Every structure is written in C-alpha cells, then in structure tokens.
Image (cartoon, rainbow, N blue to C red):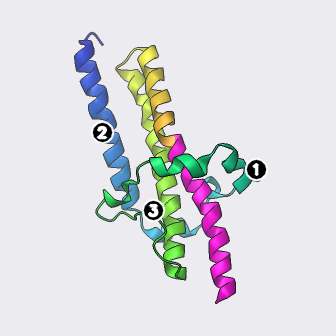
Amino acid sequence: MNASPVFITCINISAWLFFHIAISYACGSIPITFFEKDYLIFKRMKWETDQKYKKVWIHKWKTFLPDAGKVMKSGFYKKTWQSRSPEYTRQFLLETKRAELTHWLSICPAFLFFLWNSAYVGWVMVVYACITNLPFIIIQRYNRIRIVRISQRILVSE
C-alpha cells in the first residue's frame, strides 16, 4: 500500500481498537454456560503449578495490569475477590475462562495486518498482540488454579 505512514498508523490503531472492542463484546455475549465445559484450551497443563507461576513473579506483577471487567456493561470484575460463596466462586472461575478466550482471540487478528502493512510492520503487530494479551492469559490460568484450590476448601468447610 502506498499510503503515508501517518495514514497507515491511523488505520492500524483504528483496526486494533475495532478488533479489541468487537472481540470483547462477542466474548461477553457468550452465555456463561458455554464455559462450564472444560474445553482443551482451558485444561490445566501438567507443568502448571503455583510454583511455576511464582517463578515468573506473577503474584507481584498481576496487580499492575488493568481489569476490563468493569468496562463492559455485563462484565465481571476480577481484580479482587468479592465473596467466598460457592456461587461467586463458580462464576469467578467461569469468567476466567471467558477472559482467557477473549485474549486468545485478540491475538488472531494480528495476522490481518500483513494485508496492508509491510512484512516488518506486520510482525510488529504480531509481537504487539502477544505482548498485550499473553500476560492476561497467564493471569487467568494462574487465577483458575488458585480458585479451584479455594473452592475445594470452601466445599470441605461446608
């Protein structure tokens, strides 16, 4: 494309804004019951343990990342634990799956940027998508491990 760099930059920013909003809205519209099934993408991997996540200091840096749960009208705020009730714990667990799916899907459009950008800029967009989404995916997976452990304690204490 022989457009000015400023124009292409505006197109890239607008495209990312569109993709982020559209994917967030679409994932927010999925019924919560969809996330009750333990799809392969959400299954805990053998290597996923608290210790492994603590080696990357997730418990220190996760608090600095924003939670968009309050931005969406139907969003679920996951920044702090609000209740120890089984219903809330279950919803929190399912919402981590929704958030994880949202961030996985938010990486996918990066490859479309090769259509109107140079290969170099296209790869920059792929790196951008990974850098801005993988930390949130890691947080959701880490939180799910912790929530499962907490929910087991809640069930035992009842």
Q: Is residue 142 magenta?
A: yes
Q: In front here: 87 or 62?
A: 62
Question: From what the image shows, is residue 2 above or below residue 53?
Answer: above
Residue, x 34% and y 20% (percent of image)?
A: 116
* Residue 154 visible in this rendered orientation of the protein: yes
Magenta stretch: give its range. Answer: 134-158
Report which residue position mark 3 lands on. 78
Disc 3 is placed on an element classified as loop
Direction front: furthest residue:
60
Residue 58 % position (x, y): 60, 48
Q: Residues within 10 Å of mark 2 (few under 14, many from 20)?
A: few
Q: Is residue 9 left or right of residue 135?
A: left
Q: Quadrant of the C terminus?
A: bottom right
Direction right: furthest residue:
46
Residue, x 45% and y 51% (percent of image)?
A: 102
Between disc 2 and disc 1, the foreground one is 1
Residue 53 % position (x, y): 67, 49
In the rendering, which numbered label is found on residue 33?
none
Residue 135 % position (x, y): 53, 43
Report which residue position mark 1 lands on. 47
